[in-house]
Amino acid sequence: MKKNILIIPGDGIGQEVTTWGKQVLSRIAEKYNHEFVFDEAIMGHTAIEATGNPLPDETLEKAKASDAILFGAIGHAKYDNDPSAKVRPEQGLLKIRKELGLYANLRPILLFDELLDASSLKPEVLRGTDILFFRELTGDVYFGEKNRNEDNTFASDLMNYHRYEVERITRKAYDAARTRNKKLCSVDKANVLETSRLWREVVQEIAKEFPDVETEHMFIDNAAMQLVKNPKKFDVVLTANLFGDILTDEASQIAGSMGMLASASIGDGTGFFEPIHGSAHDIAGQNKANPLASILSAALMLDIAFGLQDEAKEVTNAVAETLKAGWRTGDIANADTASDKILGTEEMGAKVLEFL
Ligand code: ATP
Ligand code: MG
């Protein structure tokens, strides 16, 4: 299989971890006789420094022309202290998502047995948890009309959804449920919100096309509670933009560290694969960042963008083997971890390659 892959390392630890996602893809190509052609582009603070633009035209053109994008992270501490800065790294990310038509954000909550103690939840509650979230990305209160009256005594954000927006992500989620355990839970607030009532109707209609998948509807408040009470009960979770934002951050704590979680944003064009963590400038340039989220993002690309399930599984297994052998980066080490088993970014990435 021949694929063009664009690497956008971005800023901060993005630059340190993305190289390992890329190396894993190269190794898989070698092993399975695929031809992966890599190109690289700049974005975020790095791009602002170089060109004045967080998403240079050249990066966008390369992105549109590629089959998949492996992204690192963007951001710089200087913008946190300057909320009014007009040119900002995040603008690049919002623009590329819009330009590529990415409407579904997928976040697998994949738990490795070796890291059960890294979470704040009990191991017996967690063991066996494997959830795939589908968060809608184009609608909801994020993009509805916003208002504030002149004397600042009233504000409003319009929550809106089009039928087609619900339909397209719902089909993607059902497709994924079919390849997994044939269970889908749609999360809404249909007892209160009109957008949720439309959401639920659309999901119920599309569910008829997938009679082999068991469908459940759950209110967001209940889902938030169940997620920490009994996370194993969930498989594919489908939800709107705002609910998904909150639920996926809650769920990230099940896995113990941001350094372990990958995500994919997909639509009808090129997919975008990235760790959920940001640029983490507190540890940038110190060889401390956990590269596993980037490596697992590469696995997600193999699976979702290219349909290479065996290759994806092989990468996930190599990560599991690395953890089983006791190797840890600082963020996933605990008090019992031997100090000679705590590795830097480079050494951890190299271990995964060895197991591959
Ligand atoms: P951004 O502004 O780009 O979101 P951030 O500085 O808020 O970046 P995050 O990436 O959101 O940083 O992460 C919060 C903290 O979690 C970091 O400061 C870092 O200490 C830790 N962290 C995040 N990712 C990793 C990783 N891959 N390995 C180790 N620690 C991490
Ligand atoms: Mg952050």
Image (cartoon, rainbow, N blue to C red):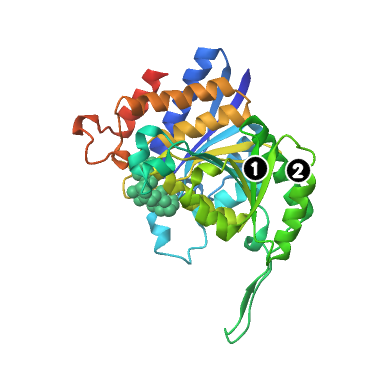
Of the pair 247 and 204, the residue shown nearer to us: 204
Q: Give the percent coordinates (x, y) of residue 223.
A: 56, 54
Distance from disc 2 to disc 1, alpha carbons, whole Å, reads: 9 Å
Image quarter of residue 134: top right
Q: Give the percent coordinates (x, y) of residue 72.
A: 47, 40
- Can you say whether 271 is above or below 303 in the image? below
Quadrant in which the N terminus appears: top right
**Residue at the (34%, 26%) spot, across then down:** 324
User: Mark 1 belongs to which amino acid?
Assistant: Leu
Q: Give the percent coordinates (x, y) of residue 301.
A: 56, 31
Q: Are marks 2 and 1 in contact (CB under 8 Å)?
A: yes
**Residue at the (78%, 44%) spot, across then down:** 206
| 26 left or right, relative to 161 | left
- Residue 281 seen by the camera: no
| 344 left or right, relative to 261 | left
Q: Say which mark, if any, is on residue 207.
A: 2
- Can you say whether 341 is above or below 221 in the image? above
Q: Say which mark, if any, is on residue 18.
A: none
Q: Does dot 1 land on a helix, a strand or a loop?
A: strand
Q: Does dot 2 land on a helix, a strand or a loop?
A: helix
Looking at the rendered structure, the number of numbered marks drawn on it comes to 2
* Residue underneath mark 1: 184
